[in-house]
Amino acid sequence: MMVCFAFFAQSIATNQNIQWPVVAQYLFHPDILSGLGMTILLTVLAILIGLAIGVILAIMRLSSSRVFQGASWAWIWFFRGVPPLVQLIFWYNLALLIPEISIGIPFGPKLAVWDTNDLITPFSAAILGLAFTESAYAAEMLRAGIQAVSSGQVEACATLGMTRGQTLRRIVLPQALRIVIPPIGNDTISMLKFTSLVSVLALPDVLYSAQMIYARTYQTIPLLVVATIWYLVLTTLLTFAEHAVEKRLHSGNRTSLRDMARRLFAIAPFRHQKELAQ
């Protein structure tokens, strides 16, 4: 395996058609760096918005309400089943379906009206498509993480008088997030690569910036190599960050859970004595 990899690396390094001087020339080109910033921004926003929606969807899936369960299931089914590229094109052409977006009283006057073309820019279409796709996958990961938390802890919180919302916010969600850190890390890396799809919207990410340059210079391979290098750099940084977070959480997980259990059992007798005194 190592011999094959070494042979491949040597053939790439010595291939004159790649034009390494051109690669070095454009690696830090202002347009490429600007596109790199757009790629990072899209990744961060899509992950944050997707996780925020995913938490809500996961809680709805675990709700006792059939309405919430059905709505959450329908969202996950749709956005996990439609490819991100199709979603990007759909959101960008939303004005063909809904010419204007308005806020007002149902069956009454409109309080505010916006032209859909003004609201749905290439950037907003990219965020909608990427974030909604991420939310569907994040919801299932978070649901599994929530269900993995011991039911005994939930029962202990109930005996202490904590509401379901307090239990979810203080006890369940922090532990569930620890469990789902590895898949969320993988999802972040996947989202970084999904951002390359926004080139179909003419949004200047790192790939589209490289395409615009080689459309003028006809140096296709060198510019694609530049984009490849930056994707590999970002993926490597995200991988290291994921491993660092996992290691930190793993080292502190037992201690935090032990402290949490100690606090619960320390509070319980006091609360019990207080209730008896009353």
Image (spheres, rainbow, N blue to C red):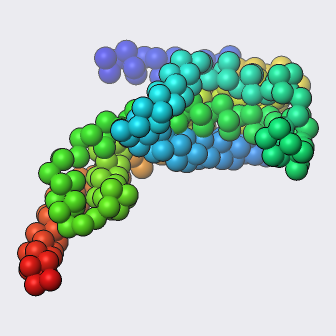
- In the depicted structure, whether residue 175 falls above or below residue 264: above
In the image, residue 65 lies at what x, y percent? Answer: 41, 37
Position of the N terminus, as image quadrant, is top left
- In the depicted structure, whether residue 181 falls above or below residue 12: below
Whether residue 43 is visible to the viewer of this picture, yes or no, is no
Left or right? Give the position of 249 relative to 262. right
Residue that protrudes farthest toward the bottom in the picture? 277
Q: Quadrant of residue 201?
A: top right
Residue displayed at 38% across by 40% down: 63
Label tally: 0
Position of the C terminus, as image quadrant, is bottom left
Left or right? Give the position of 16 relative to 268. right
In the image, residue 40 lies at what x, y percent? Answer: 63, 45
Residue displayed at 31% across by 43% down: 146
Please name whichever residue, 266 or 278, is drawn nearer the observer in this view of the structure. Answer: 278
Residue displayed at 37% across by 15% down: 4
Whether residue 141 is visible to the viewer of this picture, yes or no, is yes
Please name whichever residue, 36 or 195, is drawn nearer the observer in this view of the structure. Answer: 195
Left or right? Give the position of 19 relative to 4. right
In the image, residue 20 lies at what x, y percent? Answer: 66, 29
In the image, residue 118 lies at what x, y percent? Answer: 89, 40
